[in-house]
Amino acid sequence: MESNGISEQKIVTGDSGYILQDVPHLSDYIPDLPIVVHKDSPRGIHFRRAGPRQKIYFEPDEVRACIVTCGGLCPGLNTVIREIVYSLYHMYGVTRVLGIDGGYRGFYARNTIPLTPKVVNDIHKRGGTILGTSRGGHDTLKIVHSIQDRGINQVYIIGGDGTQKGASVIFEEIRRRGLKVVVAGIPKTIDNDIPVIDRSFGFDTAVEEAQRAINAAHVEAESIENGIGLVKLMGRYSGFIAMYATLASRDVDCCLIPESPFYLDGKGGLYEYIEKQLKENGHMVIVIAEGAGQELLSESMQQDASGNKLLQDVGLWISQGIKDYFSKQKKMTINLKYIDPTYMIRAVPGNASDNVYCTLLAQSVVHGAMAGYTGFTSGLVNGRQTYIPFYVSYSLAYDRTASSSFPFRIVALELTGSFLFRINEKQHKVVITDRMWARLLSSTNQPSFITNKEVIEDRKEHISGEEKNDENPNDENCADVDRKEHISGEEKNDENPNDENCADVAPENVNDSIP
Ligand SMILES: Nc1ncnc2c1ncn2[C@@H]1O[C@H](COP(=O)(O)OP(=O)(O)O)[C@@H](O)[C@H]1O
Ligand SMILES: O=P(O)(O)OC[C@H]1O[C@](O)(COP(=O)(O)O)[C@@H](O)[C@@H]1O
Ligand SMILES: [Mg+2]
């Protein structure tokens, strides 16, 4: 292994022609090095890596593709539409692509919109979706009938948790009928509440756009005596936008999210904290996610057309509460400015980073469809583009009995159970005992509103959470289960380095050879 005192490179070649530039190992030059622990347990869940395939199952002339967008708006929707059209035309020579007008019900109640590169050329510069969207109206039989009737054989469905549930039902019906029709999803959610994937497109733009509202709130608040700027941001069940917008801004003194229950009165409560801030700084900025504190309001029984619960306006409610508290109980004059930029943060075009992500998603989904994969959603998992089946086997829990550091890392890899769920059945939420929320607390210095007992309970619920990547903060919020999802080709066996470990350096080659 040595020439001129420098060790030679360790090159390992595999059966399929892969070349691994391996790392030196102690056992290369220390014979009989004892192995202290040899873990031989299941290695977690893997997903197929997205990308072009050797085997294509559609002739270009045969393809009749359609694209539909459903649910709430999200920055980048038009970019995904554009890139699907471009990928089909330019990578595969497919020229028949239809847009479905106005969400799921557009399949059976509206006309279609022919999509060509010329039609979609500029649309990424616009917010919204050129196809229109809707809630409700998912009638599986009518939709599949329309798909069959129009001779469509590739269905690209862009939408959130509700949409992907609808997509999986369509897929099941198509499969039941034995049709050569691919159903492929692209996850869209501004709230970043879809599990498994690292983040959804549009989220980055929403966080960026929220800065404008927070800045305005800060300017207003600091310009007046006892000024309070209150900003309500989207986030029905997950407070990611509020959390990241707060962390990005640094002008926010308190961030309230659905995952972290808070209380108003008494010691350690919100009102006490506001009073302290006003006395010390003369002003404060509060960010509240729309789903925060809903348990304190009277429960809404109303639903939207898709069956999502309509929330009470927590921003108005808390504004009134703060005003009443200071005027009636404290006899103190405050100046509260309530800013509700709700729709402004999602009605904008995608920013640079989201647009790149949209392109990757669109290209990935087209490659998968042309290769004959179906019943899947394309998404970024641990930094890699993957194909995730609508039904995902999810690790249930990890053995956390061993303490931290070395033994823990080994034990943490062991699955203690798994269950099957639809990709969007479980919501991705901020784990308030994880590092990201702790970072926020130390950045704002706000009260945590939780007792020690609650922290312990919460940690029990969100077990796992080790082995997380500091460089990719989004991952940390998936701590309970997501970290165990690996992409095909990752974290494979040291003893068989050939194919899998080359995934990083030769991604275009890994494709179908991965089990
Ligand atoms: N469980 C479900 N089964 C079938 N279709 C559904 C289901 N849930 C929602 N949908 C349909 O998906 C579409 C979008 O759902 P919605 O919840 O409004 O938005 P999102 O997909 O953004 O979460 C609607 O047309 C709705 O009818
Ligand atoms: O567009 P609507 O019906 O007013 O819904 C608003 C909701 O849409 C969202 O922006 C996104 O929700 P979806 O991902 O389910 O579309 C939520 O944050 C918000 O509560
Ligand atoms: Mg939803």
Image (spheres, rainbow, N blue to C red):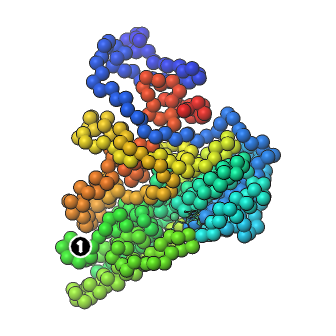
Q: Position of residue 154 (x, y in %)?
A: 70, 51
The C terminus lies in quadrant: top right
Q: Position of residue 404 (x, y in %)?
A: 25, 41
Q: Position of residue 146 (x, y in %)?
A: 74, 61
Left or right of residue 356: residue 45: left
Q: Position of residue 424 (x, y in %)?
A: 50, 56
Left or right of residue 69: residue 435: left
Q: Is mark 1 within 8 Å of ligand 2?
A: no
Q: Residues within 10 Å of mark 1 (few under 14, many from 20)?
A: some
Residue found 24% across the figure and 61% down from its top? 454
Q: Where is 367 relative to 27, above or below? A: below
Res 124 seen here:
no
Question: What secondary structure is found at the residue carrying circle 1?
Answer: loop
Mark 1, residue position: 269
Residue found 72% across the figure and 40% down from its top? 57
Residue found 38% across the figure and 62% down from its top? 243
